[in-house]
Structure formats: C-alpha cells, structure tokens
Amino acid sequence: MKKRAILQLIILNLLLLLTINNVAAVVYLSELDDAYNLGDMINLEVSISPIEKGPISIKLVCDNKESLISYTSNPAENFSVQLPLTSVHINDLTGDCYFSANYNSVDYKSLVFKISKKLDVSLSPDSFFIKPGEDLIVKGSAKRLNGAGANGVVEITIPNLGAVSVENNQNDTGNLTNDTNNVNSGDIFYGNIQNGEFSVIVNIRKDTPAGEYRIEVFAYEKDEEDQKISEGIARGNLIVAQVLTDIDIAIDGQNINPGIVFGFRPILLDQTGKNIDDEASVIILDAHNNRVFEGIFKSDSSGQYNLPTNVSAGYYTIRANNGNTTKEKTFYINEKAMVSFEFVNETLIVTNIGNVRYDKDIQVELNGKPFVKKVSLGLGESTKFKLTGANEEYSIKVSDGESEITRTGVTLTGNVVGVEEDKGSGIKRFGIVNSPIMWIFFIIILAGILLFFLRKKLKKRSFAYPSMPERKSSGGIVEGPRKITVIPRTESKKEDNKTPTSVVSISGPIRAEQASVVQGDKHKVAVIAIKVKNELGTLLQHRLEKAVEAAYARRGAVYKQKNDVIIIFSPLLTNNSKNEVTAAVVAKRIMENINYMNRKFKDKIEYGISISSGEVINKVENKKLIFTPLRSLIPAAKSLADLAKEEVLMSKEAFESSSTDLKSERKRIGDRDVYVLKGVVDHEKNKKFIDDFVKRNKV
C-alpha cells in the first residue's frame, strides 16, 4: 500500500513537470489608431510572455496583400516596431490592414485599421460671386483621415477663366506674404498647405467674360522622393458678374437732312464688349444745349426722332446714359430749302417749311403748259399764286425739282390760261411781320395806346359803379363760356410764389404728352411718378385709373408710359409756381386709394410713388399739356419711384421746396438722400388751435 502511494506521487510529479514544459509563449500587439494616411508613422509595441528561444516575424497585411516589415532572431520580451507609411516600406499597401506576428509557428493578429491616400479637402465658401477686376480668394482646409492637418501643395484649376496672376498668402513658415507667382498654362494656380489650411488670391482680369465657372481644388502631400502620397479634391462654383464698362451709340449718319426720320441705337457694353440687357436714356441736344428729344430705350434696340423740316441747322449732340456711364456723339443737321404746295380752290399756296431761306424757281403745268415762277420766301413765309383758265377742267402739276404735287379735274375760270402771283400775299414775305414776337409787340403797343386814352376814365371809376365780377371756379381759375381761358398774371405778395405769364384752364381730366416743344414756356414743375411693379389685368388697370383721379381735381396732367404713370403739376394749369405741396397732397391720396383697394380686394397692386421737381418747356395744345423735360427730370423720377416700396419718396429738391408744409422722414438709399412722406401740415387747423390757446390764457 505504501509502495503504491509513492508510485502515484511520482507519476503526478512527472505529469506536472510535463505540463509546465508544454505551456506556449503569448505575443501581445499594442492598440493602434483607426486610420492612417500615407506619410504617417506607425508605432507598434510588441510584448512576448514567456520569452522563448526562436525568431519572430511581423508582417503588414492589407486587402490580402502583405509585406514583411520586421524579423528578429532573438527578440526581447518587449520591443517596438516603427513603420513609416511610404512606398519604400509598405509597397503602396492601402485599405483595411492589420499586423500579423509569427512566433514559434504561432500567428498573432492586431486589430484592423485603415491606411489611405485620401485627404479630406473642403472650400470655405464653396460658391463665389465677383466682378471683373476683383480678387478671388480661394481658401479651405486639407486634413488627413485622423483629423491631423496636411502639409503640402494645392492646385486650383478654373477652366476658361483667363485670370492673370495668383497670390499665395502663406510662405513656408505659415506667415502672410504678398509674393505673386506666374500663372501656369491651363489656368492652374498653386499654393501651399500649412497645418491643414490654404488660402490663394487669384486676380481676375477686367475683361473676364461674365458667366459661371467651375473651381477644382487638388490638394496633395509628397514624400522625401517627391512622390505624391496623399491627395484629395474639392469643387466649387464661381460666377463672374456682367458689368457695364462702356456705351456705344449707332446713328444713321454724320450729316442729316431735316424732315427725315433720324435713327439711332444705344448699345450697353459689358467687360467683353457684349450687349447688356438693360435700358439707356437717350437725349438729343441742339447747338445751344437745349433738349429737343429724350426717351428711354432698350440696349441694342432702335429709336427714332422725326426731325422737323424747319429744325435749325447746326451741330447736335446725342447722349446715351446708364448710371454713371455716358457716351456722346455729334452729328450735323444740314441746311435744306423746302416748300410745301397746297391748293385752295383756284389758288396755289407755297410755304417755306425748310430751315433756310427759299430762293428757287417752281414750275406750274396747266394741262401740260409750263409756267416758271420765281419764289423767294423767308422761314415760315408763304405766298399765293392765282391759277386761271378757259372755264374748263385742268390737270395741274407743281414741282421745284424735289417736291411735287398733282391735281386732276380742277376747274379754272378766266379768259386766259396763266399763273399770277397774288399781290395781297406779298406782306407775308417779310419774316419780321410774320413773327409771333412782332405780333406780341404790336399788341402791347396797341394796349398801351388804349390805356393812355382811357386812363382818366379809369381813375374816375368808383365803388358806386363797380365792374361786373368775373366768375371763378373753386380753384380760383376764371370760368367762361369757352373751355380754354387765358388769365393774365397777377402779382403775389410773396416774391417766391409768382404765377406764370398766363394760366390755361381745361375742363375735365387733363392729359399730358412728352414731345419736343420748340416754342413754349419754361416752368418749374412738380412731378409724381407711379411705378407699377407687377402685371396688371384689366380690372387692376381700372382700379389704378380710379386711384389717379385724385390728380384731376388739383389740375395735374397725366400720361402713362409702360408701367409708369407720370403726373405733371405745371404753373400753366395750377396758377401756382410752387406745386410740390400740391403734388404731396395728391400723392398721399393716390397711395391711400391704392392701399384701400389692396385691402378690399384679393388682387393687389404693387407700386412705388415718388415726387420730384425740375424744369420743363411746356405749352397747351389740343387740350393737352405738351412738355419737354430738361435734364433728367423724368428718368430720375422713375428711378426714385422704383426704389419706393408702397410708400411716397420725395427727392431732396422737392422736399426743400416744401419742407415747412410737410411731415417727412429722411432716408439714405445708396448715395442719395430721400424723404419718406408722412403727411401734410394743416396750417389752418394749427392756426385755429393757437388762436384758441391764446384766448383761453388771456389775463
């Protein structure tokens, strides 16, 4: 029994010894980052326990490809493996990777990590809007997968841009610099990436075409052998604006005859000489810098000015304007002798309609028989010729080589076929007698003579025998049996509120028409411009017309031009040379009318209203106010109305002429001072309040 126990103990010790000798060594591989870029350094810590004799090999395995990176015959219990991620050391292995250690024929694996060539590149911002000639600053970041900033090179490509230079605002130390590099071919620009950031300034040429461009940013890092090891791409958008750089004016010719249609075409040009879809104001000035024509035209569209036959000869200027850009061209209107022929019964009337004296022969044919007559007429003069015949019908032809008129079946009486000048018309040959100025002079002389003889009689008149009073309307304008009445000027106590020479009253709504006024009065007027900013159907058009009716009661003349309504308050109609307050009252009422209808109905009128003041040459003709605005009165009024948003804006000039009578708020729009109309001061109400206050506080 004792021997058996000893045997069992010996066997147990042998088994224990055998077990201890068969315990295998374990290899521990340290934890790693989740991702690495080419160019990074990996530190792998290796531990062996227990240490045994024999070699250990370590491999890098990526996507089933491997590379031996370490082999040690007699490893220490703890050692490190440093692996630079370069093509020389890892043979360009990338992807999902892990380390594999083989020790005494046993394999050990690390956790999986990623090795990549990709850089995360972004732009800030990624969309750009610039004007030609400005600097484009392209900046952003380039980072590795682990979030560390890259250090390398950035290439910026903008196809078809045509930029001229590029500036990189960082040097090798990361400090700001102003060094300018030459542009490479193909519109590729280079900059440095420092600690993951880059910023490149690209100077855009002034003649860069307007349009959309693509920006491509390629960032990369290089190894010691100048090989790209990590790279990334970002994209952005660039819009180059179309800007006005010049204006051209195409005209029919340099020498123009009067009486024809003068054609012109304003052209707004951008930085590359292409047409801009915008409008230009066109003004034609005579030799004395007086405006004879003006209008607003689309760029590259044709305009026309019907030259009167009697327009003065000389040099004229045509001016096109948009914003601060202006272009002028000159042309010459030739001297042209022209006459018109007119038949009145058996009389031929010849009138000089040209712009110079007419001294030519005309030929009159009566049934083919010619009669040559000498005609000498001053500007605007006429003469008459009596046509006689043998009491039968004649075919008549009159010509001066340029103008011609024919008539058939004209019965001429008399005993002899002939053409004789009507001596009674000879007085009209003297232009001075036919001049309106001379007629006015004669009337003044006659009136003076009449007053001289009646002065004693006028002095004897007393209140016992007053003259019959004139009937006046509520506006203070004389009413009579005729619809148009001219009122002599009366002196006002205030020198700054003088009435015009004459005032014309037209019953009912007054219309206005913008045209070239050769003979008219020069007046300062107030202008209301209403800009309609949406399309109006028939119903909204009717509502707008109802709102504008407030102008008729205040003697405003109205005309419509596209989406603009213009109201002119002229002293010719209002009997007042300061019409800005009247315009403010009407503009406020129109605004209230439109706002009321906008609240009441579903369909709205989007609008803006402005009040401006300036000078015009105007007259009343055929119950209309015909006017020629001076300087840029109408375009400026429209521009101000376009800035208004359902409010009334006043120009600085209009406000200063009526500031004591208005409530307003000053407003700055761009480089202009404008005033928002808030109300009109009721002086009568204020006076009554002050009088009542004084009465209550009398001692």
Image: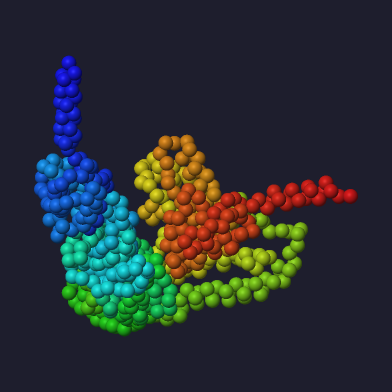
| Front residue (pair 169, 250) | 169
Residue at image coords 43%, 78%: 288
| Front residue (pair 466, 396) | 466
Residue at image coords 33%, 78%: 330
Residue 58 horizontal/vertical position (percent): 16, 49
Residue 567 horizontal/vertical position (percent): 47, 55
Residue at image coords 37%, 68%: 175
| Front residue (pair 414, 640) | 640
Q: Is residue 13 visible?
A: yes
Q: Is residue 406 visible?
A: no
Specify the farthest residue to the right.
Answer: 699
Specify the farthest residue to the top.
Answer: 1
Q: Is 211 placed above or below 163 here?
A: above
Left or right: 468 with respect to 149? Answer: right
Residue 549 horizontal/vertical position (percent): 49, 47
Left or right: 305 with respect to 567? Answer: left
Q: How is the image coloured?
A: rainbow
Q: Quadrant of residue 517?
A: bottom left
Residue 599 horizontal/vertical position (percent): 48, 38
Left or right: 654 with respect to 453? Answer: left
Left or right: 328 with respect to 236? Answer: right
Q: How many marks?
A: 0
Quadrant (top left, top right, bottom left, bottom right) of the N terminus = top left
Residue at image coords 44%, 49%: 607
| Front residue (pair 55, 311) | 55
Q: Is 442 placed above or below 64 here?
A: below
